[in-house]
Amino acid sequence: MLEIQARPEHPRNAAAARMLISGRIEALTPRPSEDAEAYRKRAEPVATDPKALELYRLQFAALVDRVRDALAGAMPTARVEVEVAEPRIVRRRPGPATRSSSRRTTGTTIRTTTTTTRRAG
């Protein structure tokens, strides 16, 4: 998921825009027709494998780096900073239309700060 928050007017020390990037490990996302036991059997090997989780983390970090570099290239006068959020588990609340399940997500915020100079005229 990608969300952009931009403000045309902002304090000088605040970011003019923020881009929030969130990711989900598809292998840990329950499928619509899956019951809890089938989900557990499918997801547990991935969820308990530190190498697999590290691979997903590195893939997400590479995506964030590419977006950061693209923003910095497109706006050479801007300062582009990355704020990293820790991976977290999001648990869905059980309800009539959903089963109790969880998914692992990770999020990153990319902040851009632009400096505009005004000429007297």
Image (spheres, helix red, strand yellow):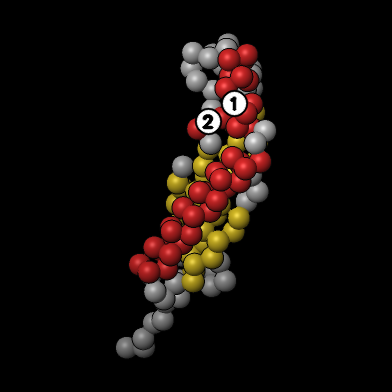
Q: Is residue 98 above or below residue 1?
A: above
Q: Left or right? Give the position of 33 relative to 92.
A: left
User: Residue 8's image quarter?
Assistant: bottom left
Q: Quadrant of the C terminus?
A: bottom left
Inspect the image, locate mark 1, and give the three-letter code of the amino acid beneath it. Answer: Ala
Label 1, residues with CA under 10 Å away: few <14, some 14-19, many ≥20: some
User: Residue 53's image quarter?
Assistant: top right
* Residue at 59%, 26% in the rendered image: 43
Please, what secondary structure does the residue beneath circle 2 have? helix
Q: Measured from the top left, where is residue 7 in percent x and y? A: 46, 59
Q: Is residue 95 above or below residue 27?
A: above
Of 72 and 29, nearer the camera is 29
Label 2, residues with CA under 10 Å away: few <14, some 14-19, many ≥20: some
Mark 1, residue position: 43
Mark 2, residue position: 27
* Residue at 58%, 15% in the rendered image: 38
Q: Earlier in the sequence, mark 1 or mark 2?
A: 2
Of 114 and 82, nearer the camera is 82
The answer to whether residue 15 of the structure is visible from this angle is no
Residues marked 1 and 2 touching at CB (< 8 Å): yes
